[in-house]
Amino acid sequence: MTADGAMTQSPWPSASDRQAERETKREAVLATAVRWFNAKGFHATNLDDVARALRVTKPTIYHYFSSKEEILFECVQRGLDAVRLVAEAAQDRGGSGADRLQAFLKEYALVMMRDFGMCVSRTSDTQLGPEGRRRFRALKRDIHDMLQGVIEDGMRDGTLAAGNPLLAANTVAGALNWIALWYDDAGKMQPEEIAEGVVATLMSGLAAGRKDRP
Amino acid sequence: MTADGAMTQSPWPSASDRQAERETKREAVLATAVRWFNAKGFHATNLDDVARALRVTKPTIYHYFSSKEEILFECVQRGLDAVRLVAEAAQDRGGSGADRLQAFLKEYALVMMRDFGMCVSRTSDTQLGPEGRRRFRALKRDIHDMLQGVIEDGMRDGTLAAGNPLLAANTVAGALNWIALWYDDAGKMQPEEIAEGVVATLMSGLAAGRKDRP
DNA sequence: TTTTTTCTATACTCGCGAGTAAGGCGCTGT
DNA sequence: ACAGCGCCTTACTCGCGAGTATAGAAAAAA
């Protein structure tokens, strides 16, 4: 039985407890900041507001982050990480290109209705400095390449219509990213419902006359 | 023969000439400003830069506009006016709902690759004050309603697949608006080509299996 | 010519908000 | 006990850029 054993809970935090505590506080800052960024925009949000919402003061925030830009960057990074995870899951999923694409798109859409996902669409790379912009673009490019890759697979195996994969990827990415700009938490439609509907439209198109939808 | 007759060009400008001159200068400010806004973002652009590009100074700009926000608003207004014009043209065009929609979408896409159109997508309403935000949203809502109206027409006459018109409108608007964020002037694809491709994807969908595209 | 209006420049103000300096409190380890 | 570090505070600096006060040149009106 170790000192960290499950039998007794020591009131004195261990070193790893305190490390975890620090991480929890960092995450709390990000969670609060991202909501302000989404609601008011990055520039219109000042860190005093964020600090007040957390019932601390601005220097406290600077104890965990070195700059406002770093906070924004970590927010979009979390959003993009979430998208990358669903992209990887879709790739590993097996099935036809169309099946993998559909699964990918739906999860992608759902991410865009969560705080960190929304932040990605609402953040312009002009809000970051040169280095942050470079990294932001690189992360977005990774996502794009995975999306385009799945589309190419589907075109190759014949489950997706032939066409320009770059254009197709940008088209669907646009429709999905845009969700972050019109989705309303308090609205009537549920995320699940929106994701299903948008993906169905993208897969089947607007025009009438599909074989499978008479 | 009037004083403004076509026969002789007086070197002394008439009152209407000077009015036109003033308008020309206003437009020049907007044309320059919108390019800076699109390239660097609204906040990162300062009016000294814009003035220098026009080889004047900041107070000159304030002689034509009352604030930086007014300049931005007039830029997005021009972009949205362009979209409204193509929407009205599509409505008057006649033909089935699907035909009118397709015509609308293509012209919409083309607008999003021009300076003022790009500015619309790149501008968040958080960049405007309460009044500007209200007007901006109203203009965007007009466009949305027209788009959704055409889609409803198409669903009613059976040329578009049945579904949720609100969702469909948001999906296509997203794909089109997003063009403004990835289109590259210096890229290989021409606006015409992009517009055709994106609209075709939206109308027909990504999945293989259309009757009209075996 | 004189007066007035239009347009533009030089040289400022001024508020906002990112980021910092310096100190205090409490826990940890020696 | 005491040195050291983690955490958080109050109270500041300071630069940037929107917007302005003022004046002068040129053109229009009188």
Image: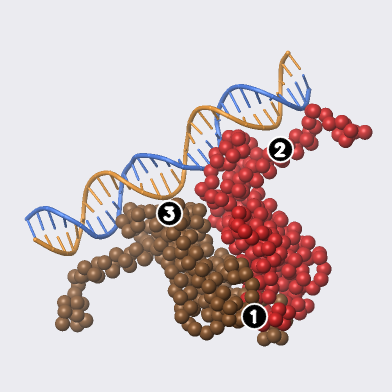
Chain colours: A brown, B red, C orange, D blue
Q: Which residue is mark 1?
A: B208
Question: How many tags in the picture?
Answer: 3
Please name the residue shown 53% across and 80% down the image: A100
Labels 2 and 1: the sequence-earlier one: 2
Q: Quadrant of the C terminus of chain B?
A: bottom right
Q: Amino acid at mark 3?
A: Glu
Gap in angstroms between the C-alphas marked 3 and 2: 42 Å
Q: Nearer the viewer, mark 3 or mark 2?
A: 3
Identified at 69% across, 71% down, the residue is: B200
Mark 1 and mark 2 in contact (Cβ < 8 Å)? no
Inspect this view and state whether residue A208 appears. Answer: no
Which residue is more in the foreground, B121 or B146?
Answer: B121
Image marks 3 and 1: residues in contact by CB distance under 8 Å:
no
Compared with B66, A187 (above or below) is below
Q: Nearer the viewer, residue A177 or A133?
A: A133
**In this figure, which residue is indicated by the disc labeled 3?**
A131
**Residue A123 position within the rendered picture, expressed as x and y whole percent measured from the top left:** 50, 59
**Secondary-structure class at tag 3:** helix
